[in-house]
Image (spheres, helix red, strand yellow):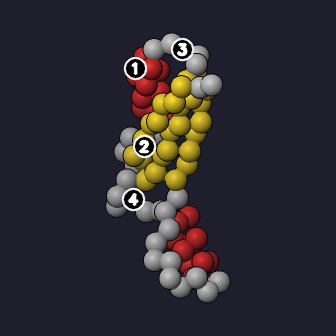
Amino acid sequence: MFEAQVTIGLKKGVSDPEGVNTLKALQLLGFTNVKNAATFRTIDLLIDGSDENKVLREVEQMCQRLLTNPVIHQYEIKILESK
């Protein structure tokens, strides 16, 4: 059994309105030392399997087919053996 953690963010140059609004709100609250805010989404998956490489390939396919939009998203996959 493996745990896969997929972190999804926007590619450089793609507008992040949620990040921009978060930055503005933080600065309005007096946190003027914050210079940038970016939003990311994390998806945790528990996957039954015994081969880490096979699990990684499957999660890669999940990202390409459903979890991300390859035009605007970048993503990182971390595979951990579940206890």
- Which mark is first along the chain, 2 or 4? 4
Which residue is denoted by mark 1 in the rendering? 53
Alpha carbon distance from label 3 to label 2: 22 Å
Badge 1 amino acid: Asn
Alpha carbon distance from label 4 to label 2: 14 Å
Alpha carbon distance from label 1 to label 3: 10 Å
- Which mark is first along the chain, 2 or 1? 1
Badge 3 amino acid: Gly
Labels 3, 4: front one? 3
The label on residue 14 is 4
Question: Can you give x and y, in whole percent of width and height, for residue 63 in the image?
Answer: 46, 33
Residue at (54, 74) in percent of width and height = 23
Q: Tally the numbered discs.
A: 4
Badge 4 amino acid: Val
Mark 4: few, some, or many residues within 10 Å (few <14, many ≥20)?
A: few
Labels 1, 4: front one? 1
